């Protein structure tokens, strides 16, 4: 990972440290919690698969343990699919989302 140029006498920040600082300042905990809950409640419902997949991807960037592992992410996506689409993908094993 790269680093951010530090001030004189300070150790350099890693990209992860910078992300944590930016999240703390510009992504309040209450907003983050609300988005994580929105992700956990997300279901395909009456929308098309592509619209559901778009919403899923937009919310899955969150640093939630629910999406930390690719396999868990795929399982969550498949479980929230509706009807016949869910039945079609249920028997298939996918390596990545």
Image: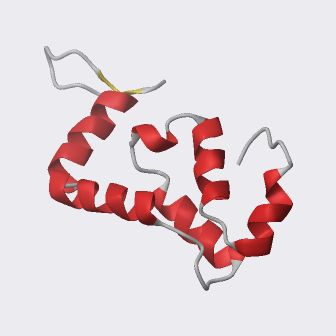
Q: Position of residue 87 (x, y in %)?
A: 80, 63
Front residue of this view, candidates 65 and 84: 84
Q: Is residue 69 left or right of residue 50?
A: left
Quarter of the rendering containing residue 54: bottom right
Q: Position of residue 66 (x, y in %)?
A: 46, 42
Figure disc tally: 0
Image coloring type: secondary structure
Quarter of the rendering containing residue 96: top right
Q: Is residue 39 above or below residue 97?
A: below
Q: Is residue 20 above or below residue 46?
A: above
Q: Is residue 66 left or right of residue 46?
A: left
Front residue of this view, candidates 72 and 8: 72
Q: Residue at x 36, y 30 (%)?
A: 16
Q: Is residue 48 left or right of residue 67?
A: right
Q: Residue at x 61, y 85 (%)?
A: 46
Front residue of this view, candidates 79 and 38: 79
Q: Position of residue 4 (x, y in %)?
A: 33, 30
């Amino acid at each position: 990972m790269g680093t951010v140029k530090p001030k004189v006498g300070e150790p350099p920040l890693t990209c992860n440290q910078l992300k944590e600082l930016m999240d703390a300042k510009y992504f309040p905990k209450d907003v983050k919690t609300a988005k994580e809950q929105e992700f956990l409640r997300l279901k395909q419902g009456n929308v098309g698969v592509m619209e559901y997949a778009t919403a899923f991807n937009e919310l899955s960037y969150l640093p939630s343990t629910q999406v930390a592992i690719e396999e868990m992410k795929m399982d969550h996506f498949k479980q929230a699919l509706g009807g016949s689409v869910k039945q079609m993908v249920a028997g298939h094993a996918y390596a990545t989302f």
